[in-house]
Amino acid sequence: MELKLYSEFGTLKSVFMLRPGSEIERLTPDNTSILLFEDVPYLEAMQEEHDEYTALIKSVTDARVFQIRQLLLEILFEDRLRIKLLEQVMKDVPDPRILDMILGRYSRAETVNLLIAGLTAGELKRKTGNSLRADIPANQYLITPSPNFYFMRDPSAVIQAGVISSNMKYSGRQLESVILKMIFENHPEFSENYSQVFPSARRTGRIPTIEGGDIVVISDKVLAIGCSERTESAAIQEVARNVLGQGPVERVYEVKLPRQRNYMHLDTVFSIIDENLILTYSDAMEDIHETAVYRLEKGESGKGTIRKENINESLTSILKKEIRYLEIVETGYGRPEIALKEQWYDGANVLAVGPRKVISYDRNKLTNRAMRDRGVDVIEIRSSELSRGLGGPRCMTLPLERARI
């Protein structure tokens, strides 16, 4: 497996996914904002919808679907890695005995579950019979649950030059990136071909934030990254320095996104579904006018310098220059009131499983009709519960490999 992607629409060959589990049961009306969620889904129905989605990907593409829980279990059978991961997770716990309690009493399978679903002080006490310090409440999380982890696109991204290991904006999601990085580095299925392009191995000090939902492969030579509430310009500059001149990337665009909830990441604004076709939320596309491009300029000595150029054009105009004969499908069939509603449930966030073949939420009726009228094979999935986290089919997958176009 190459662990490099050169398009967003080549036939999907392998992908990471995570089936929602008991971490979703941690959500209550009182903690949804703290746990970065929008609602309290019904887990059983959510799992049914996700299982159907996973089976659909396999049936229409023959892609290999790697489930994160299984991969994590396979690497944690090595004691060294189990200790290393738990030490990273538990470095700020209020009682130094907690790590030893977990290592001594929890099986590998239980460890996988608590790393994703979280662990409270009361649960640890009931499991081990040991009392913690009196000032640690029973409902205090020693490991914070990760209900957003089924949105696999955010904690990492595979691009033309290798893998970006995200540094998530909010601390409650940072464990997701830690887990994926450990899988990439240590699982025999991926470790030999794993090349990390962010963060730089040589960097020191604070790592700027970047999330995978802001990263879009425009073509084999072009990468676009949204500068959003969750992705900083400094991270985009670092990615540009690391990929330009290494091949094949020649241009990296930094796209300034409006600070609005329904523009959270660049992939909520548009999706590429064929070499000359994109699906967009038109209001957002017209709102974006601050874009910069990074290029490598070589001098007479042969040494290269990264140059940044500000572009006073709309994102639509830039994409028309990068994608020949570009055609645009608008969410909600171009009707503003419908587009606004369907965009709330990620109408523009579809997963291309092949050229002009996408998976989309069934609730986005007019968006799906607009794509079909442009010759796109739209495969719908149920979305009653999966959509409650406000992420679409693209958000729920991390493609590792696609067929070259």
Image: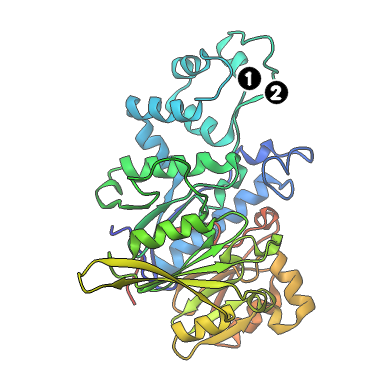
Q: Residue at x 73, y 75 (%)?
A: 339
Which colour scheme appears in the figure?
rainbow
Q: Which residue is drawn at 71% across and 48% down?
A: 41
Q: Quadrant of the C terminus?
A: bottom left
Q: Is residue 398 left or right of residue 27?
A: left
Q: Is residue 14 visible?
A: no
Mark seen at residue 166: none
Secondary structure under tag 1 reads helix
> Which image quadrant for residue 143?
top right
Secondary structure under tag 2 reads loop
The answer to whether 306 is drawn above or below residue 212 in the figure is: below
Residue type at numbered disc 1: Ala
Residue 375 position in % (x across, y down): 54, 87
Front residue of 397 and 70? 397
Q: Earlier in the sequence, mark 1 or mark 2?
A: 1
> Which image quadrant for residue 401?
bottom left
Front residue of 40 and 267? 267
Q: Is residue 325 visible?
A: yes
Residue indicated by mark 1: 121
Residue type at numbered disc 2: Asn
Mark seen at residue 139: 2
As drawn, which residue projects farthest toward the front? Answer: 300
Q: Is residue 198 left or right of residue 394?
A: left
